[in-house]
Image (tube, rainbow, N blue to C red):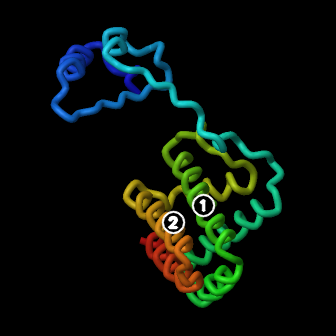
Amino acid sequence: MIEKLYHQAAPKLLKILEEPPDKTLFILVSDNPDLVIATILSRCLPIRIPKIPGQEKRKLQMGEEDHYHFETFRNWMRLCFSRNVPELIGFASETGKIGREKQKKLLRYGLEITSNSTSIRFGQSQFVTVEGEELEFAQKFSPFLTPEKLPRFYDLFNTATYHIERNAHAPTLFLDLSMKITGLINE
């Protein structure tokens, strides 16, 4: 948030912006470029990034498939939290039968709800894209997403998606993922 830079710090920043070290790129981010100090702005190439599609709030009524992913993910995380291994084995087996596209959508939903929970945890409510039951779940899930755990959550879901796309044995993959999430949540 370069617009929040103290005027006293500007001269120090100007010097390095004018003569950057070799192979150095500075990315200055601003929500309100009109407030950026003119001398800094004059040394920058402004690039406006549009809103990311899908970041708008959902309608209160979830579609049938959205509701399926929400219910499935919420139940899955509850099983992980309670360390219910026999039911996690059943979950992995059942999830292995739903088909690869639905499995990938479930994992993408996991990334989406993790993103929303992260926004809640760090006080960035303007980035929360869910409402109703999903919002309530995201609020309850957010305390488990500490800065140390967050990259591991993302890595687990992205890696699982990668392996599903390459025809991994889904029941084994989801059981392994469940056990890792169980360990991460209960650390």
Q: In the orientation shown, which residue stands out farthest toward the bottom?
A: 86
Q: Is residue 119 above or below residue 32?
A: below
Q: Are marks 2 and 1 in contact (CB under 8 Å)?
A: yes
Q: Does dot 2 land on a helix, a strand or a loop?
A: helix
Q: Residues within 10 Å of mark 1 (few under 14, many from 20)?
A: some
Name which residue lies at 55% across and 84% down. Answer: 169
State the residue in front, 36 or 158.
Answer: 158
- The answer to which image quadrant residue 84 occupies is bottom right
Q: Image check: 102 left or right of 67?
A: left
- Determine which residue is flagged by label 1: 108
| Position in image of residue 168 (x %, y %) | 53, 80
Answer above or below: position of 40 versus 187: above
Can you give x and y, in whole percent of width and height, for residue 27 in the image? 35, 31
Q: Residue at x 31, y 10 (%)?
A: 39
Q: Amino acid at mark 2?
A: Phe
Where in the figure is residue 116, as x and y percent of width and height? 59, 50
Provide the residue designation for mark 2: 157
Q: Nearer the viewer, residue 12 or 39?
A: 39
Residue 74 placement, left or right of 21: right
Quadrant of the rendering where the C terminus is positioned: bottom left
Task: Give the x, y percent position of residue 25.
Answer: 28, 32
Q: Is residue 181 left or right of residue 23?
A: right
